[in-house]
Image (spheres, rainbow, N blue to C red):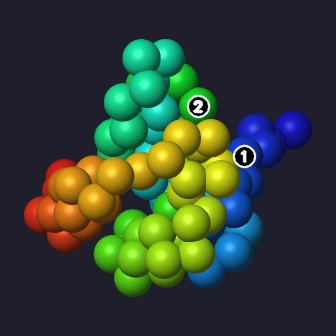
Amino acid sequence: MPKTIPLRQCLGCREQKPKNELIRVVRSPEGEVSLDFRGKAPGRGAYLCRNSACLKKALKSRALERALNVPIPEEIHSRLLAEMEGGDG
């Protein structure tokens, strides 16, 4: 029997995609928000497509803040955008 591929929903475009095609945004137990390109970091996670348009859309609609249950300051917005645009994903 083939192994099932877990699906996750992108916060930007709201499409269901295989987990390995998405980037996880994680809130660590200490409350720090970062991008998790491997999908293994501990903490609460939310998923985004591998393009900055989905990240911008999720930030604009505050979907990321709702999913992670933490207010996201402006400097974190710009850091996440810079990481995604120049990241290793």
For this orientation, the residue located farthest to the right is 1
| Dot 1 crowding, Cα within 10 Å, few <14, some 14–19, many 20+ | few
Who comes first in sequence, dot 1 or dot 2?
1
Q: CA distance from mark 1 to mark 2?
A: 17 Å
* Quadrant in which residue 2 is drawn: top right
Can residue 63 be spotted in the picture? Answer: yes
Q: Could you tell me residue 15's position as x and y percent? A: 69, 75
Identify the disc placed on residue 44: 2
Identify the disc placed on residue 52: none
| Vertical comparison of 6 with 10: above or below | above
Please name the amino acid that badge 1 sits on: Pro
| Vertical comparison of 73 with 50: above or below | above
For discs 1 and 2, the disc positioned in front in the rendered view: 2
Report which residue position mark 1 lands on. Answer: 6
Can residue 37 be spotted in the picture? Answer: no
Q: Is residue 6 left or right of residue 43?
A: right
* Quadrant in which residue 38 is drawn: top left
Instruction: Please tell me whether mark 1 sits on a helix, a strand or a loop.
Output: loop
User: Which one is in front, 33 or 85?
Assistant: 33
Q: Which residue does the image show at 65% across and 53% down from the upper left?
A: 66
Q: Which residue does the image show at 72% across and 68% down from the upper left?
A: 16
| Vertical comparison of 65 with 38: above or below | below
Q: Which residue does the image show at 49% across and 47% down from the upper left?
A: 71
Q: Could you tell me residue 75's position as x and y percent? A: 21, 55
Q: Which residue does the image show at 59% across and 31% down from the upper left?
A: 44
